[in-house]
Amino acid sequence: MPLTEILERGLSELGLTAGSGQRERLLRFVELLRKWNRVYSLTAIEDPPEAVRLHLLDSLAVAAFLHGERVLDVGTGPGLPGIPLAIVQPERRFVLLDCNAKKIRFVRQAVIELGLSNVVPVQSRIESFTDTTGFDCVLARAYASLAEIWADASRLLKTGGSVLALKGRRPEAELGELPAGVAVDIHRLRVPGVDAERHLAELKATGQDS
């Protein structure tokens, strides 16, 4: 099946609309990943159809849960899920954070080649990163437990903001480790063409002492 068809069917199943220019940028991003991967070892996924499913559609499955104007993508790696989300949601501003110099170098180049004016790549560890404005959402792939992700990221949230932690299986064992004052909702994600389990943990401060 052509990549364009895999992408269009996936977008439809996710309930997302993307213009022709956005779809071209998404597929161009897959091309850039494949090209740079030969030297930078950005991803283990080299098959283009799988890259569309596991990079693009997997990233875009969380689009409906974003809110507000500013989004921080922690541990973005080669720009996932931040770049696909920034392409389909140009009204939002994204900061893509990673401590790996090679990966951020790729992200910077991808941002230039894709013409993404709403993305700022930053090389830093989350523990060292500061921001005076605050974020409406902090996205974090499963780099740590929910309690550790909350401890790292909650200080960067605006009032009413949320941490969106991407997990594989439902993280039952981690829920009891969260401190008091944190409300959590677990959402089952369905990624078109992907059989593996995907869950999104949405964490928010309740206003109670933690």
Image (spheres, helix red, strand yellow):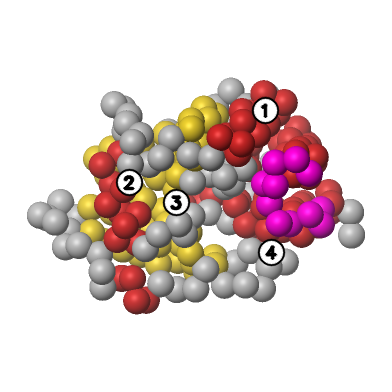
Residue at the outermost right position: 1
Which disc, if any, is residue 192?
4
Q: Give amino acid for label 1.
A: Gln
Front residue (pair 193, 142): 142
Question: What is the CA distance from the residue labelled 1 to the residue labelled 4?
Answer: 28 Å
Q: Give amino acid for label 4.
A: Pro
In percent of width and height, residue 190 lies at 59, 67
* Vertical relation: 113 (above or below) 102: above
* Vertical relation: 145 (above or below) 103: below
Magenta segment:
38-48
Q: Is mark 2 on a helix, strand or loop?
A: helix
Horizontal side of residue 73 vs 153, given as left or right: right
State the residue position of label 2: 153
Tell me whether circle 2 and circle 3 mark residues in contact (CB < 8 Å): yes
Q: Which of disc 4 and disc 1 is earlier in sequence?
A: 1
Question: What is the CA distance from the residue labelled 4 to the residue labelled 3?
Answer: 21 Å
